[in-house]
Amino acid sequence: MLDERKRLLRLALQDPDEGVCSAAAEALEQLESVLGLEQVAEALKSENRGPRVRAVFALERLTSPKAFPLLLSALKDPDADVRAAAVQVLGKKGHPKSLGGLVQRLKDPHPAVQVHAVEALGNFRDGRLIPYLSALFREGNEELVVSAVRSLGKMGLSEAEADLLPLLQDRRSAVRRETAQALGRLDA
């Protein structure tokens, strides 16, 4: 009976309804000790984007250390949606060994992946990230600049102050607004 339950839950991971996929992923998490990660790893090998993205988000709910290499591998997926999902999950998990892969995604060819990488890095309170995030201030993409400022504010490191202060004079009001908020969150 357990085998049938496992089989049907694996199929439900590929359901077109996101709610069904989430519910199936939660159920699989509860059965993780019995199931392992094999079915999620198989979904990551799918030729279709949907199952791969859902598998990455399923890894978010799994606490097994075996999930980490699968997430790092997903950062290199040819599909931007899969990379973006992996960046988000790694950012939420906050594992220090994911920093290198997340920093590499700052140069991703897809702007949405870049923004997600910037936001993910904001979950790490690591001064080594300040130069990487501050370098993005010269980008023309306003969303990317605002996200970099927000992440520096979230990190709260006073070492970012010198890089942030000039942005109070930026021509874009969203950048100025986010900078003012970020400066208020820095360590005194």
Image (cartoon, grey):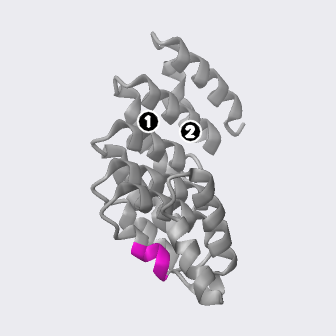
- Residue at figure coordinates x 55%, y 53% from the top left: 126
Q: In this view, does 183 lie to the left or right of 175?
A: right
Along the viewing direction, whichever of 181 and 66 lies nearer the viewer: 66
Q: What residue type is labelled 2?
A: Leu
- Residue at figure coordinates x 49%, y 59% from the top left: 54
Q: To which quarter of the image does residue 6 belong?
A: bottom right
Residue indicated by mark 1: 134
* Element at label 2: helix
Along the viewing direction, whichever of 145 and 3 lies nearer the viewer: 3
Give residue 151's position: percent from left, percent from top. Answer: 56, 39
Along the viewing direction, whichever of 58 and 97 lies nearer the viewer: 58
Give residue 99's position: percent from left, percent from top. Answer: 46, 59
Part of the protein shown in magenta: 38-42
Q: Are marks 1 and 2 in contact (CB under 8 Å)?
A: yes
Residue indicated by mark 2: 152
Q: In which quarter of the image is the C terminus?
A: top right
**In the image, residue 124 above or below residue 1:** above
- Residue at figure coordinates x 30%, y 63% from the top left: 47
